[in-house]
Image: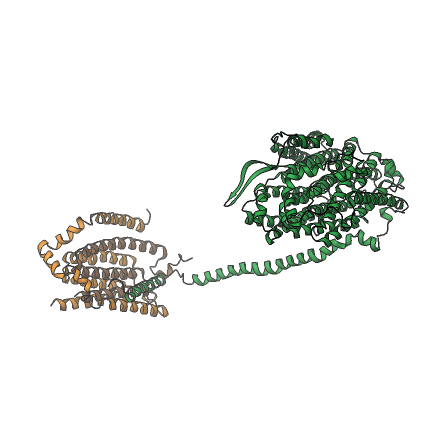
Chain colours: A orange, B brown, C green
C-alpha cells in the first residue's frame, strides 16, 4: 500500500517538475511547481516526517509559491516564451550534461539499502519506536532547540536580514 | 523505500538542473532552483529515516534559507525588471569583462 | 737625506721601540676633507658663474676669484699635512724594528657568509715608501698646480679632483686587503678619468678620458678575477692572512697561482700601461700637465708595480707569471722607447718615456728584484714628475706667448719651440738634471735604480730561463741607450737651437712664477740624491761611489726586506741563489760604468747631431715618412686595435642591438604580449555574461566531481 502510494507521489513529483520546466506560461509553471511540492510533502509523510510535511505544504507550497505568483502577476510576465527557451547546440549540451548527471546519480543510488554502511545506523524500526514515544513535533524539536539552537537563532537573523534586504531592493526609493 | 526515494530525488534534481540550463526567464530559473532544493530535501528526509532525525533538522534549515532566498531573489528580479523592463537573463550581460 | 748615520742606526739599535702608527686614518682622511671643501667651493663657484652668465655678463670677465684663495690654502695644504703625518709615521717606523705589518682596522666593511672584509689600513715598509712618494711628490705637484692652473675657471674643481685622487691613491697603497686596495684602485681610475677629461668641452679630451677608463676596465676585470680566485683558494682576502699561508696552500708553479698572478698582472698592465693595454696613457696627456705628472707618471701608473710587489709572494710561487711580467715589461720598455724617438708633442715623448720606465719596473719585479722595482718607482717619481712639471712650465710659457699674439700654433709641439733656455733658465737646468737622471748618468738617481734593475735581470739569467733572461737583459740595456737619445732630442728641440716660436711670440716668453719653479728645484734635488739611498756595496766601494763617499747602505733593500723576505725565500728555495755575475761575465761595477759611459756618450752625440737638424715649425713641416713615419704613428698600434678590437666589438654590439635585442628579445617580449592578448581574447569567449552558460559550466564541474566520487569509490 505504502509503496503504491509512494509511486503515485513519485510520478506526480517528477511530472510536476517536468511541467515546471516545460510550461510556456509562468503561471502554469508555478501551478506545476505547487503540485510537485505537495507530492514531495506526501512522500515526507510516507517517510514518517510528519512535521516537515506540514511545513512543506504551509511554507513552501503556500507562502513561497504565493510570493512567486504575486511577482509574476505584478510584472505581468509570460508573453515571450520563444525567447525564454534556449535552443540549438547549447540545449543539446544541457541535455547531455543533465542526462549524464542523472545516470551517475542513478548508478550511485541503486542498491543503497543493501550497502553494509546502513547496518550501523538505527534504521527505520528504531525511528518508528522513537516517533511513537515522543510524537512528530517533539522528535524534531529536541535537537532543534538543544544541539542546533545556535544555527536556529542565526537562521532567525538571516530571515530578518532577508526581509530588510528584500524591502530595500524592491522599493523604488529607499 | 530508500532507493526509490533517492532515485526520485535524483530525477527531480536533474529536471531542476535542466530547467536552469535551458530557460531564460529569471523567475522560471528561480523555480527550477527551488526544485533542486526540494530534491535535496527529499534525499535528506529519505536518509533521516534510517540515519537519524538530524536530517530533518537540516531540511528545516534549508526551507528557511529557501524562503530568505526567495524573498531577496524576487526583490532583485523586481528591481532588475524596473531597469530593463524584462526578466530575460540574456539581457543581463554587463558583468562579463 | 743623510743616510750614513741613519743606516748605522738600524744596525746598532739594540732596543728597538715598538712601532705605534700616528693617526694613520687622518693621513687618508685629510685629502678627502680637502676634496669635500674644494668640491663645495667648486659647486658654489660654478653656480655663481652660471648666474653671471644668465645675467648677460661674459663669464670669464666677471670671474669670482674670492674662493681661489681658500682653494689655494686647502688644496695643497691637506696634502702637505698628510705628508707631515707620513713623515712622523716614517720616523716612528724607522726607529722601530718592525717585521710584521701593522694593520689598523676601523670597522667591519663586508660580512657575507665566509667573506669578511674589514675597512683596514696596513702600514709596513712598502706602504710607507709609497705614502712618502704619493704625499711628498703629490704635495710638490699641488704647489706647482697653484701657478699652473691659477687662471683656469675650474680651479676649485681641479683641486677637488686632485685631492680626491690623493685620497684614493692612499687607500690603494694602505689597503690591508684586496677589496680595500681595489676601492683605491677604482677610485684613482675614476680621478684619472675626471682629470684627463678635465677640459671636457673639448671632445678629443673627453674621449681620451673615456679611452683611459675603458682600457682600465679591461685590466680591472683581471684584478677582479684574481680576487675571486684568491678568495676561493684562501677563503680570505686580507693580505696579512693570504701571504703567510700562500707557500703552504699553493703548489709552486701550479696552475692556480699562475692563473691568479696572470690575472693580477692583467690588472697591473691596465693600470700601469703595459702591452697590450698601454694605449690609453699617451692619450691621457690631454689632461692638465700637473695631472700628467702626478697621476700618469709619478703615482697612479705605478700602482701596478706596487701591486706586484705587494703580492710578491704569489709571483714568486709562479715562475711562469714572473717571466711573463719581465718579458712584457722589457718589450713595453723597448716599444715605447722607439715610439718616443719620433714624437713631436713634448708630453707625448714624456708619456712614452713613462711607459718605457714602467716597463723597467715590471722587469724588476718580474725577475724577483722587488726592492729594485720599488727603488726605480721612487726615483722615477722624482725625475719624471720633474720632467712633466718642466714641460708644464714650458707649455705654460708657450701658451702665454702664443696667446699674446693670438697665434693658433700648438703650444705643445716641440717643432714650435727651440731656444727656450734663454727665457726659462730654471726650467732648462732642472729639466737637464732630470734628463741625465732618466738617461742613467752617474751619479744621478736614475743611474742607480736603472742599473740595479738591469743587473738583476742579468742575474736572473743564471737561475731560470737563461736564454730568455739573457735576451731581456740585452734589450733592457739597449732601451737604456734609447732613453738617452730620445730625452736628449727632447731637450735640444725644446731649449736649444734657434727659436721657432716667431719673433713677436718670443718676446712674450718668460720664466714660470716662483710657485712653479720651487717645486721644480725641489724635485731636481731629489732627482740628484734620490738614488743614494740604495747604492750597492760593490758600487759604493768603487770609483763610481767615490770610493766610499756615497753611503754604502743598500738601505732600501734592507728597509723592504720584511716585505720581500717571504718571496725571496721562495725564489731561492726553488731557483737557487743566483750567481753574482752578468750573463757575459763582468761585475756590477763594470756594467754600470759601461752603461753610464754609453749613456753619456749618446747624450753628447745626440745633442751635437740634433743641434744641426733643420726643424721646421709644425705648420710647415711635412708628415714624417719611412721608419720615422712608422715610429711617429706609434707602429700603427692604435689603428691595429681599432681595426681588430674596436671595430669588431662595435660590429658585435650593432649585431646585438639590431638582431639580438630588436629582433630576438623585443620579438620575444612583444610576442609574449601578443600571445597573452590572443589567449585572453580566446578565453574571454567563455565569459559570455550569460547565466545559462555559467550554469552549464558549473554543472559540468559538478558532473566531474560526482563522476570522480562514483568511479573512484569514496564513501558509498
> From where the camera sits, is residue A7 visible?
yes
| Left or right: C564 as drawn, with respect to C435 | left
- Look at the image and tell me whether residue C443 can be seen: no
| Camera-nearest residue between C231 and C46 | C231
Indicate whether C441 appears above or below A83.
above
Q: For this view, does C356 lie left or right of residue C178?
A: right
Q: Is residue C398 left or right of residue C358?
A: right
- From the image, which quarter does the N terminus of chain A lie in? bottom left
Could you say which is closer to the camera, residue C633 or residue C467? C467
Total numbered labels: 0
Front residue of B35/C473: it is: C473
Image location (x, y in percent) of residue A161: 27, 48
Q: Quadrant of residue C635?
A: bottom right
The image position of residue C634, as x and y in percent, is: 77, 52
Q: Residue furthest left?
A: A133
The quadrant holding residue C378 is: top right
Q: Within the image, what quadrant is residue C611 found in?
A: top right
Residue A124 x %, y %: 13, 61
Query: Residue B82 placed where, x, y %?
Result: 34, 54
Seen in the picture, residue C401 relative to C673 is either above or below; the reply is above
Amino acid at each position: 500500500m505504502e509503496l503504491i502510494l509512494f509511486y503515485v507521489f513519485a510520478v506526480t513529483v517528477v511530472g510536476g517538475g517536468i511541467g515546471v520546466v516545460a510550461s510556456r506560461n509562468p503561471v502554469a509553471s508555478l501551478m506545476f511547481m505547487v503540485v510537485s511540492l505537495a507530492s514531495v510533502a506526501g512522500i515526507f509523510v510516507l517517510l514518517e516526517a510528519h512535521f516537515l510535511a506540514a511545513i512543506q505544504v504551509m511554507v513552501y507550497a503556500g507562502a513561497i509559491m504565493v510570493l512567486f505568483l504575486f511577482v509574476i502577476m505584478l510584472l505581468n510576465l509570460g508573453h515571450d516564451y520563444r525567447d525564454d527557451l534556449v535552443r540549438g547546440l547549447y540545449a543539446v549540451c544541457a541535455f547531455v550534461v543533465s542526462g549524464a548527471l542523472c545516470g551517475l546519480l542513478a548508478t550511485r543510488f541503486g542498491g543503497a539499502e543493501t550497502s553494509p554502511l546502513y547496518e550501523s545506523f538505527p534504521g527505520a524500526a528504531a525511528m518508528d519506536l522513537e516517533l511513537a514515544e515522543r510524537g512528530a513535533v517533539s522528535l524534531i524539536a529536541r535537537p532543534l532547540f538543544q544541539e542546533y539552537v545556535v544555527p536556529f537563532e542565526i537562521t532567525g537573523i538571516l530571515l530578518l536580514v532577508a526581509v530588510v534586504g528584500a524591502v530595500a531592493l524592491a522599493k523604488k526609493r529607499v | 523505500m530508500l532507493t526509490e526515494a533517492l532515485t526520485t530525488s535524483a530525477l527531480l534534481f536533474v529536471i531542476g538542473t535542466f530547467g536552469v540550463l535551458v530557460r531564460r526567464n529569471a523567475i522560471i530559473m528561480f523555480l527550477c532552483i527551488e526544485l533542486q532544493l526540494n530534491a535535496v530535501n527529499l534525499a535528506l528526509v529519505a536518509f533521516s529515516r534510517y540515519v537519524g532525525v538530524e536530517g530533518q533538522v537540516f531540511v528545516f534549515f534549508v526551507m528557511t534559507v529557501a524562503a530568505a532566498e526567495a524573498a531577496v531573489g524576487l526583490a532583485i528580479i523586481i528591481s532588475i525588471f524596473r531597469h530593463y523592463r524584462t526578466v530575460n537573463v540574456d539581457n543581463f550581460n554587463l558583468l562579463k569583462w | 737625506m743623510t743616510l750614513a748615520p741613519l743606516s748605522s742606526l738600524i744596525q746598532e739599535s739594540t732596543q728597538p721601540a715598538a712601532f705605534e702608527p700616528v693617526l694613520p686614518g687622518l693621513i687618508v682622511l685629510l685629502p678627502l676633507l680637502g676634496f669635500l671643501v674644494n668640491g663645495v667651493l667648486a659647486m658654489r663657484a660654478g653656480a655663481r658663474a652660471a648666474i653671471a652668465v644668465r645675467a648677460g655678463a661674459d663669464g670669464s670677465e666677471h670671474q669670482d676669484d674670492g674662493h681661489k684663495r681658500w682653494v689655494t690654502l686647502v688644496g695643497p695644504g691637506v696634502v702637505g699635512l698628510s705628508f707631515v703625518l707620513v713623515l712622523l709615521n716614517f720616523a716612528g717606523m724607522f726607529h722601530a724594528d718592525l717585521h710584521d705589518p701593522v694593520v689598523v682596522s676601523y670597522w667591519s666593511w663586508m660580512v657575507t657568509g665566509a667573506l669578511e672584509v674589514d675597512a683596514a689600513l696596513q702600514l709596513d715598509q712598502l706602504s710607507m715608501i709609497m705614502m712618502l712618494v704619493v704625499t711628498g711628490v703629490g704635495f710638490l705637484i699641488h704647489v706647482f698646480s697653484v701657478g699652473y692652473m691659477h687662471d683656469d675657471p675650474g680651479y676649485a674643481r681641479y683641486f677637488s679632483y686632485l685631492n680626491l685622487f690623493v685620497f684614493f691613491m692612499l687607500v690603494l697603497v694602505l689597503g690591508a686587503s684586496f677589496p680595500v686596495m681595489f676601492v683605491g684602485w677604482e677610485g684613482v681610475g675614476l680621478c684619472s678619468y675626471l682629470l684627463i677629461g678635465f677640459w671636457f668641452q673639448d671632445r678629443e679630451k673627453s674621449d681620451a678620458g673615456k679611452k683611459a677608463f675603458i682600457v682600465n676596465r679591461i685590466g680591472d676585470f683581471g684584478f677582479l678575477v684574481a680576487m675571486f680566485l684568491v678568495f676561493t683558494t684562501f677563503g680570505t682576502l686580507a693580505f696579512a692572512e693570504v701571504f703567510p699561508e700562500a707557500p703552504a696552500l699553493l703548489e709552486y708553479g701550479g696552475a692556480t697561482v699562475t692563473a691568479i698572478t696572470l690575472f693580477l698582472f692583467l690588472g697591473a698592465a691596465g693600470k700601469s700601461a703595459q702591452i697590450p693595454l698601454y694605449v690609453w696613457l699617451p692619450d691621457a696627456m690631454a689632461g692638465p700637465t700637473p695631472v700628467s705628472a702626478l697621476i700618469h707618471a709619478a703615482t697612479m701608473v705605478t700602482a701596478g708595480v706596487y701591486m706586484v710587489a705587494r703580492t710578491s709572494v704569489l709571483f714568486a710561487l709562479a715562475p711562469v707569471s714572473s717571466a711573463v711580467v719581465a718579458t712584457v715589461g722589457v718589450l713595453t720598455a723597448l716599444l715605447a722607447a722607439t715610439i718616443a724617438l719620433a714624437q713631436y708633442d713634448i708630453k707625448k715623448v714624456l708619456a712614452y718615456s713613462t711607459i718605457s720606465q714602467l716597463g723597467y719596473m715590471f722587469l724588476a719585479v718580474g725577475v724577483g728584484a722587488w726592492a729594485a722595482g720599488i727603488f726605480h718607482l721612487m726615483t722615477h717619481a722624482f725625475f719624471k714628475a720633474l720632467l712633466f712639471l718642466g714641460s708644464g712650465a714650458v707649455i705654460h710659457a708657450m701658451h702665454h706667448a702664443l696667446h699674446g699674439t693670438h697665434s693658433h700654433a700648438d703650444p705643445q709641439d716641440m717643432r714650435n719651440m727651440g731656444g727656450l733656455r734663454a727665457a726659462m733658465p730654471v726650467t732648462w737646468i732642472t729639466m737637464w738634471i732630470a734628463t741625465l737622471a732618466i738617461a742613467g748618468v752617474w751619479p744621478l738617481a736614475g743611474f742607480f735604480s736603472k742599473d740595479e734593475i738591469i743587473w738583476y735581470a742579468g742575474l736572473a739569467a743564471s737561475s731560470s730561463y737563461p736564454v730568455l733572461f739573457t735576451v731581456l737583459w740585452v734589450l733592457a740595456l739597449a732601451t737604456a741607450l734609447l732613453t738617452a737619445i730620445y730625452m736628449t732630442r727632447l731637450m735640444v728641440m725644446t731649449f736649444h737651437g734657434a727659436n721657432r716660436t716667431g719673433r713677436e711670440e718670443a718676446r712674450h716668453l718668460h720664466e714660470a712664477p716662483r710657485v712653479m719653479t720651487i717645486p721644480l728645484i725641489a724635485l731636481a734635488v731629489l732627482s740628484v740624491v734620490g738614488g743614494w739611498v740604495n747604492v750597492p756595496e760593490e758600487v759604493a766601494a768603487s770609483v763610481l761611489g767615490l770610493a766610499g763617499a756615497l753611503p754604502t747602505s743598500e738601505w732600501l733593500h734592507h728597509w723592504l726586506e720584511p716585505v720581500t723576505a717571504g718571496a725571496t725565500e721562495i725564489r731561492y728555495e726553488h731557483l737557487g741563489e743566483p750567481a753574482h755575475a752578468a750573463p757575459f761575465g763582468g761585475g756590477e761595477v763594470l756594467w754600470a760604468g759601461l752603461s753610464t759611459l754609453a749613456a753619456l756618450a749618446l747624450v753628447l752625440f745626440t745633442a751635437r747631431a740634433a743641434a744641426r737638424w733643420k726643424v721646421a715649425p709644425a705648420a710647415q713641416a711635412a708628415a714624417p715618412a719611412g721608419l720615422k713615419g712608422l715610429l711617429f704613428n706609434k707602429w700603427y698600434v692604435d689603428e691595429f686595435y681599432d681595426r681588430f678590437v674596436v671595430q669588431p666589438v662595435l660590429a658585435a654590439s650593432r649585431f646585438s642591438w639590431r638582431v639580438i635585442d630588436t629582433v630576438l628579445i623585443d620579438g620575444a617580449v612583444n610576442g609574449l604580449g601578443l600571445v597573452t592578448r590572443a589567449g585572453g581574447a580566446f578565453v574571454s569567449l567563455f565569459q559570455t555574461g550569460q547565466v545559462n552558460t555559467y550554469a552549464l559550466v558549473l554543472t559540468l564541474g559538478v558532473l566531474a566531481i560526482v563522476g570522480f566520487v562514483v568511479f573512484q569509490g569514496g564513501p558509498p
